[in-house]
Image (tube, helix red, strand yellow):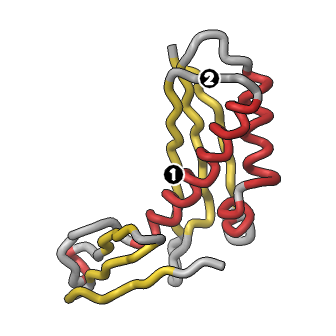
Amino acid sequence: MGKVNIKWTGKMAFNVEVGGFNIPIDATEKVGGMNGGPQPKPLTLASLGGCTGMDVISILTKMRVKPDYFNVEVNGELTDEHPKYYHKIHIRYIFRGRDLPMAKLEKAINLSQDRYCGVTEMLNKAAEITHEIVIEE
């Protein structure tokens, strides 16, 4: 079971308490906020990136694959009409390292996307999620 507490702190700002950690969220000045923290929708993308990133690193560790660098970029495209939501999401898995086996990278990512990442599972019901693997020198 998950539980978060979202306490209003003034104007459009809130403090989100998650597992003992605090995250300020706010809206832009254009809509009455003070831009004092991230907006809620992009945090959905952060949750997706964090969930799948943790899966991938965990799976690769079990496969004895150790990248020197790993980054997950998540880009979302909002619908034009209200309620606006991400209807297209693209994930870039970026790796650096020597002799990274593409087959194992693909397997770890596919296991995360198809089996382990609950955030992916939820968002798949509303969005088309695509991904790519980038190996940088």
Q: How many marks?
A: 2
- Viewer-side residue, 69 vs 21: 21
Query: Residue farthest to the top?
Result: 99
Cα distance, mark 1 to mark 2? 25 Å
Crowd around label 2: few <14 · some 14–19 · many ≥20 (10 Å): some
* Circle 1/circle 2 CB separation < 8 Å: no
Q: Quadrant of residue 13?
A: bottom left
Where the N terminus falls, by quadrant?
bottom right
x 29%, y 76%: residue: 27
Q: Is residue 9 above or below residue 92?
A: below
Crowd around label 1: few <14 · some 14–19 · many ≥20 (10 Å): some
The residue where tag 1 is placed is 75
Q: Position of residue 22 (x, y in %)?
A: 34, 70
The residue where tag 2 is placed is 66
Q: Is residue 105 shown left or right of residue 73? A: right
Q: Position of residue 91 (x, y in %)?
A: 59, 46
Please identify, in this view, whether the residue under mark 1 or under mark 2 is nearer the observer.
Answer: 2
Q: Is residue 61 above or below residue 17?
A: above
x 45%, y 64%: residue: 43
x 34%, y 87%: residue: 7
- Viewer-side residue, 51 vs 102: 51
Q: Amino acid at mark 1?
A: Asn
Task: Tell me the element at label 1.
Answer: strand
x 63%, y 37%: residue: 57
Q: Is residue 8 shown left or right of residue 75? A: left
Q: Position of residue 74 (x, y in %)?
A: 52, 49
Q: Position of residue 77 (x, y in %)?
A: 53, 60
Q: Which mark is residue 37?
A: none
Q: Is residue 46 above or below residue 55?
A: below
Q: Amino acid at mark 2?
A: Lys
Q: Is residue 32 shown left or right of residue 111? A: left
Task: Tell me the element at label 2.
Answer: loop
